[in-house]
């Protein structure tokens, strides 16, 4: 399976380790990623708040690029995922809207045709690769680890608009269990990490992530497993910020699912990748690093 | 000449009323009921609004009338499998499921159940209490006979051995019979919305989050706690109770966009009942709109507020969380009148779920050739002028299977009588 | 029965006269705002909102109420539309299809037209206009990419992005800050 790899803005800027792990793991599972040249920002919620037509057109331009490549899109970031998915969905269902957007796109010689789908990493791992193949790729199961998974808001909501397209908790949990790790239920699993308020209202963003950390701590998990770079940032770096502002320590290592999978497949993380986790993961995973 | 006989499908209060009305006019009534006993939902309730009568005390005499009336033939533990024909001459195939007990011999003494080694959750008690594999669903069951639940039975034969009347017959076979009737009445009632579909309310995960029907069983003297309101996790008397309205009702997410019409009524009734039993217990009702229609109900709400101190909070709660140690529930909500986000801890939370058509309603409708609406309720042939006629001539419906347009007990009884009159009109045609 | 003082009546009349009764229609006519027509003010959104739990400044139900009643100038020029996380919990739980989370976007779109944009959002919009991305890797990150042999992060596509943003009018918004 081949996908147009939509990187988004946040990952190249702040989470290179996530990108590297994805590029290492997915080919082993039969997924080929083709870089999207000239892709622009997906138009995350901050930009959507500025202008509707711009959002539509910016997202549609990316969809056009994928159409030109003849490939469906795979995103890593939940924000990118939902932005592109929503626009794709809306344009496919609403011809009038599509015409309006194509009017804007004609300025740059592009036309949205509605030929591709938008998927995220969990989608691809669960749907294309499948839990059993993931399981059989595990050479060194990570047993005895209790985690709380953070699928993130834009992977699981709003169900009314996305209905069957959305992957929910169950898919991520099933994938996590396949590595040998136990995904523990916890209160407010659906709750936001606070990411979207970063740089807009840092104080509130911190308070939200703190609530999330409290809920995770109450469930006595040993680590948090994320899929979205925003969630990772909020819960990992966020713990340092919460410590500074609330004087509370949670000592909860945060790790991307793909990194868990990578270690389970026997591929060690490099030094710089380990250091990318501000809450140290060396304690839990020392043999695999 | 029309057959002077009628089939009533569903032995709840509206079906019972229709049966008695028709039987007393001299028509033969076959009352088919899926479960081992007639009685329906009303048998599960504690007290009924507005009279605050004990529900079973009102229902049981009517149930006895059904069993004794020479014109009524009870076909319990039976299902309608096929219908052919037209008004005045329907041929109905009814499957009599084997209860492995001879109804004519069984005295209902219960010695078989005393010795049965298998215990399973009791459906009548909404899974709160247990019953044996050989059981009577509730003490006032009609017919007064035991039933063997072959699914859970381990075939030890003890029941058969202990029965003094020789009524247990573990080799009993199912029976298909054909009935010739002139008209049919559908009165199969409702099922409850399953609140596990709203995970944030914790139903199914938290023991002290229960449905209103489960509450009725806890309040009812014949229920699993003998009528003492004791909360499921530890058997303590709850001192702070919350009712949550519109759980599934008026909700586009589940397709149940209608108002179930009786929940506001019964929750205020239950609140007052609880306050009368336990004046020191506080009761709070979380509502979106308080639908207090009909004679006496607004006054009843006013009394609930002023005399009984029941609290009414206008909101639809967002989340319910459980304290792992005490098993108390914290409800998160915005008091929309005060405009404040709050959370309050309760001992017990009662959810008022939407009332749905029975899960097999569509199947039965298909057998009858009748139409159901988008929700699955039986469609009236003309909702304005013929509200108890289904879309099939000669087939009528009454009670909640018609939908929540009305739905409390007096309405169900009224509709039962209405269908009896409509049936009589068909049966009298030459 | 209480009696109203003259000044209270005056205040009420004054407050009513300052309402903009077309506000609800204005929001309802935006692509993301039509849910406001279905709101029954049940409060399930605010009962579920993670931000509302943390600050009384933010209350999705109240925001919908303000739209419905016409409190335009109390909403659009203020901080009120900008507390939302766009986590869609409200939308997910609303029983009526009020799409509160979507209405929030409609509010913000209108707020931006009035020049009400938080600095963080404005900075992202500017970065988008100048580089096609809302944030960019710093030098060390770019060097690391190169050392790993990963694809380059460029401003390819900038010309097209700028043409698009000019056509939609967002260019003006960015340049006016």
Image (cartoon, helix red, strand yellow):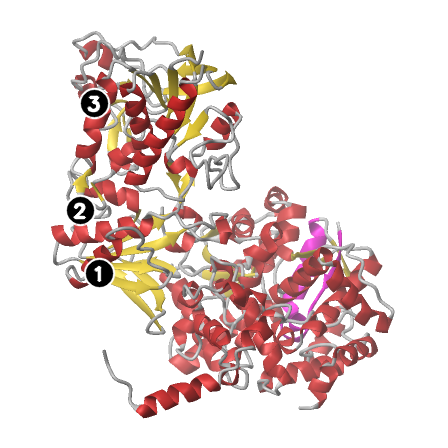
Chain to which mark 3 belongs: B
Q: Which mark is residue B229?
A: 2
Tags 3 and 1 both on a single chain: yes
Q: CA distance from mark 3 to mark 2?
A: 29 Å
Percent coordinates x, y for residue B216 in the rendering: 24, 42
As drawn, is B92 to the left or to the right of B265? right
Discs 3/2, front: 3
Query: In this figure, which residue is indicated by the disc labeled 1?
Result: B302
Observer-side mark, 1 or 2, equals: 1
User: Closest to the observer: B187 or A104?
Assistant: B187
Name the spot of residue C23 as percent of width and height, x first. 55, 77
Res. B428 visible in picture = yes
Give the crowd class for mark 1: few <14, some 14-19, many >=20 residues within 10 Å. few
Is residue A7 a member of the stretch shown in magenta?
yes
* Disc 3 to disc 1, C-alpha distance: 37 Å
Label 3 in the same subunit as label 2: yes
**Chain to which the residue tagged by mark 1 belongs:** B
B169 in relation to C7, above or below: above
Magenta-colored span: A2-29
Residue at numbered disc 3? B64
Question: In the current view of this chain or complex, which residue is farthest to the front?
Answer: B430
Q: Are marks 3 and 2 in contact (CB under 8 Å)?
A: no
Residue drawn at x 43%, y 75% is A207
Q: Name the subunit of mark 2.
A: B
């Amino acid at each position: 399976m081949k996908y147009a790899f939509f990187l988004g803005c946040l990952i190249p800027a702040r989470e290179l380790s996530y990108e590297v792990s994805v590029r290492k793991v997915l080919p082993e599972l039969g997924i080929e990623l083709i870089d999207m040249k000239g892709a622009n920002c997906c138009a995350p919620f901050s930009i959507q708040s500025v202008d509707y037509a711009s959002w539509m057109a910016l997202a549609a331009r990316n969809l056009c690029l994928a159409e030109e490549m003849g490939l469906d899109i795979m995103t890593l970031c939940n924000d990118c995922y939902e932005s592109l998915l929503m626009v794709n969905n809306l344009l496919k269902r609403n011809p009038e809207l599509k015409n309006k957007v194509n009017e804007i796109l004609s300025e740059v010689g592009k036309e949205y045709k509605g030929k591709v789908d938008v998927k995220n990493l969990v989608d691809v791992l669960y749907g294309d690769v499948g839990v059993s193949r993931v399981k059989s790729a595990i050479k060194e199961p990570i047993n005895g680890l209790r985690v709380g998974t953070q699928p993130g808001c834009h992977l699981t909501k709003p169900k009314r608009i996305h209905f069957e397209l959305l992957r929910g908790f169950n898919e991520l949990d099933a994938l996590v269990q396949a590595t040998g790790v136990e995904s523990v239920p916890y209160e407010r699993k659906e709750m936001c990490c606070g990411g979207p308020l970063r740089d807009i209202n840092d104080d509130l963003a911190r308070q939200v992530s703190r609530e999330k950390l409290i809920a995770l701590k109450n469930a006595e998990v040993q680590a948090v497993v994320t899929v979205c770079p925003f969630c990772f940032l909020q819960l990992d770096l966020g713990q340092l910020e919460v410590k500074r502002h609330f004087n509370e320590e949670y000592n909860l290592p945060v790790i991307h699912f793909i990194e868990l999978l990578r270690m389970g497949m026997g591929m060690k993380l490099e030094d710089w990748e380990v250091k990318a986790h501000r809450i140290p993961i060396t304690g839990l995973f020392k043999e695999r690093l | 000449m029309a057959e002077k006989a009628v089939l009533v499908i569903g032995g709840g209060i509206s079906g019972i009323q229709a049966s008695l009305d028709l039987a007393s006019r001299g028509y033969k009534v076959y009352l088919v009921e899926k479960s081992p006993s007639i009685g329906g939902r009303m048998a599960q309730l504690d007290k009924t609004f507005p009279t605050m009568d004990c529900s079973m005390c009102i229902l049981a005499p009517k149930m006895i009338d059904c069993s004794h009336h020479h014109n009524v033939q009870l076909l319990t533990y039976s299902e309608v499998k096929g219908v052919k024909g037209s008004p005045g001459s329907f041929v109905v195939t009814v499957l009599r499921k084997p209860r492995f007990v001879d109804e004519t011999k069984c005295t209902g003494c219960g010695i078989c159940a005393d010795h049965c080694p298998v215990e399973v959750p009791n459906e009548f008690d909404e899974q709160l209490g247990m019953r044996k594999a050989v059981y009577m669903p509730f003490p006032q069951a009609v017919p007064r006979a035991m039933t063997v639940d072959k699914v859970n039975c381990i075939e030890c034969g003890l029941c058969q051995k202990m029965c003094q009347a020789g009524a247990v017959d573990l080799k009993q076979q199912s029976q298909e019979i054909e009935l010739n009737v002139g008209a049919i009445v559908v009165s199969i009632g409702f099922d409850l919305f399953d609140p596990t579909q709203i995970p944030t309310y914790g139903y199914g995960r938290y023991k002290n989050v229960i449905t209103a029907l489960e509450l009725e069983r806890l309040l009812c003297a014949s229920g699993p706690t003998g009528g003492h309101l004791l909360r499921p996790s530890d058997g303590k008397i709850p001192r702070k109770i919350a009712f949550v309205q519109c759980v599934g009702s008026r909700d586009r997410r589940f397709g149940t966009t209608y108002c179930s019409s009786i929940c506001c009524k019964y929750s205020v009734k239950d609140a007052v009942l609880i306050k009368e039993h336990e004046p020191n217990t506080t009761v709070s009702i979380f509502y979106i709109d308080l639908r207090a229609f009909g004679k006496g109900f607004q006054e009843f709400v006013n009394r609930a507020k002023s005399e009984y101190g029941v609290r009414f909070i206008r909101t639809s709660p967002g989340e319910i969380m459980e304290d792992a140690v005490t098993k108390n529930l914290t409800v998160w909500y915005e008091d929309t009148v005060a405009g404040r986000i709050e959370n309050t801890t309760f001992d017990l939370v009662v959810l008022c779920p939407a009332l749905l058509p029975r899960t097999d309603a569509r199947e039965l409708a298909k057998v009858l050739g009748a139409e159901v609406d988008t929700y699955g309720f039986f469609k009236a042939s003309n909702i304005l002028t013929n509200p108890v006629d289904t879309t099939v001539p000669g087939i009528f419906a009454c009670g909640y299977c018609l939908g929540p347009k009305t739905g409390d007990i007096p309405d169900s009884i009224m509709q039962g009588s209405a269908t009896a009159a409509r049936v009589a009109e068909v049966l009298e045609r030459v | 029965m209480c009696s109203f003082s003259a000044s209270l009546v005056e205040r009420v009349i004054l407050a009513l006269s300052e309402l903009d009764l077309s506000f609800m229609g204005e929001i309802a006519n935006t692509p993301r705002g039509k849910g406001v027509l279905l709101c029954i003010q049940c409060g399930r959104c605010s009962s579920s909102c993670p931000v509302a739990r943390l600050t009384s400044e933010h209350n999705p139900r109240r925001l919908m109420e303000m739209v419905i009643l016409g409190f335009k100038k109390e909403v659009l020029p203020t901080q009120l539309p900008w507390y939302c996380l766009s986590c869609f919990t409200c939308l997910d739980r609303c029983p009526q299809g009020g799409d509160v989370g979507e209405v929030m976007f409609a509010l913000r779109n209108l707020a931006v037209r009035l020049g009400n944009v938080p600095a963080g959002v404005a900075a992202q919009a500017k970065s988008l206009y100048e580089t096609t991305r809302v944030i960019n890797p710093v030098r060390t990150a770019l060097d690391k990419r190169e050392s790993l042999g990963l694809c380059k992060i460029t401003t390819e596509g900038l010309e097209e992005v700028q043409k698009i943003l000019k056509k939609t009018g967002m260019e003006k918004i960015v340049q006016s800050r």
